[in-house]
Image (cartoon, helix red, strand yellow):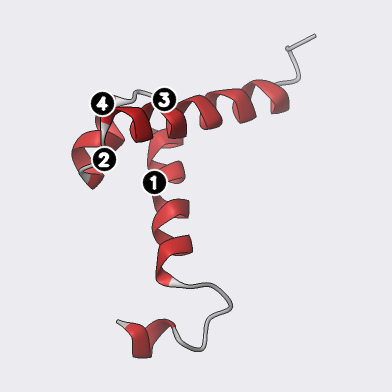
Amino acid sequence: MDKLVRPLPVGLDRLRQDRILEEALASGADPLHPAHVFSLAAHTSLRCTIAVATSAAEHDPRTP
């Protein structure tokens, strides 16, 4: 895997983090989904989904 991502400007950890956040967003910020898919601890999964939900609320034009 290292050979495949070496030319990229990001590492494997950053790619995994991005994938976790995208999956949390796609699942409607349900903390159980990323915890199951990525074998995350409950606290880590909750932290990711809170970040996604907060970001989505900030970009929602209906939010005052």
Instruction: Report how many numbered discs are placed on residues in the image.
Output: 4
Tag 1–tag 2 contact (CB < 8 Å)? yes
Q: In the structure shown, which secondary structural element does the residue marked by tag 1 occupy?
A: helix
For label 2, count other residues whose C-alpha is less than 10 Å away and answer few (under 14), some (14-19) or many (20+): some
Q: In the structure shown, which secondary structural element does the residue marked by tag 3 occupy?
A: loop
For label 4, count other residues whose C-alpha is less than 10 Å away and answer few (under 14), some (14-19) or many (20+): some
Quarter assignment of residue 22: top left
Measured in 3D between alpha carbons, the distance from the residue under mark 2 to the one under mark 4, in whole angstroms, is: 9 Å
Tag 4–tag 3 contact (CB < 8 Å)? no
Q: Quadrant of the N terminus?
A: bottom left
Residue shown at the point (35%, 23%) measured from the top left: 30
Which of discs 1 and 2 lies nearer the camera? The answer is 2
For label 1, count other residues whose C-alpha is less than 10 Å away and answer few (under 14), some (14-19) or many (20+): many
The image shows residue 33 at horizontal and vertical percentages of 26, 31
Identify residue type, mark 1.
Ile
Q: Identify the mark nearer the N-term, 1 or 2.
A: 1
The image shows residue 62 at horizontal and vertical percentages of 73, 12
Q: Identify the mark nearer the N-term, 2 or 3.
A: 3
In the picture of the structure, the residue carrying the numbered disc 3 is 28
The image shows residue 47 at horizontal and vertical percentages of 45, 30
Tag 2–tag 3 contact (CB < 8 Å)? no
Q: Identify the mark nearer the N-term, 4 or 1.
A: 1
Measured in 3D between alpha carbons, the distance from the residue under mark 1 to the one under mark 2, in whole angstroms, is: 10 Å
In the picture of the structure, the residue carrying the numbered disc 4 is 32
Q: Can residue 27 be seen?
A: no
In the picture of the structure, the residue carrying the numbered disc 2 is 40
Tag 4–tag 1 contact (CB < 8 Å)? no
Measured in 3D between alpha carbons, the distance from the residue under mark 2 to the one under mark 3, in whole angstroms, is: 17 Å
In the picture of the structure, the residue carrying the numbered disc 1 is 20
Measured in 3D between alpha carbons, the distance from the residue under mark 4 to the one under mark 1, in whole angstroms, is: 12 Å
Q: Is residue 53 above or below residue 44?
A: above
Measured in 3D between alpha carbons, the distance from the residue under mark 4 to the one under mark 3, in whole angstroms, is: 11 Å
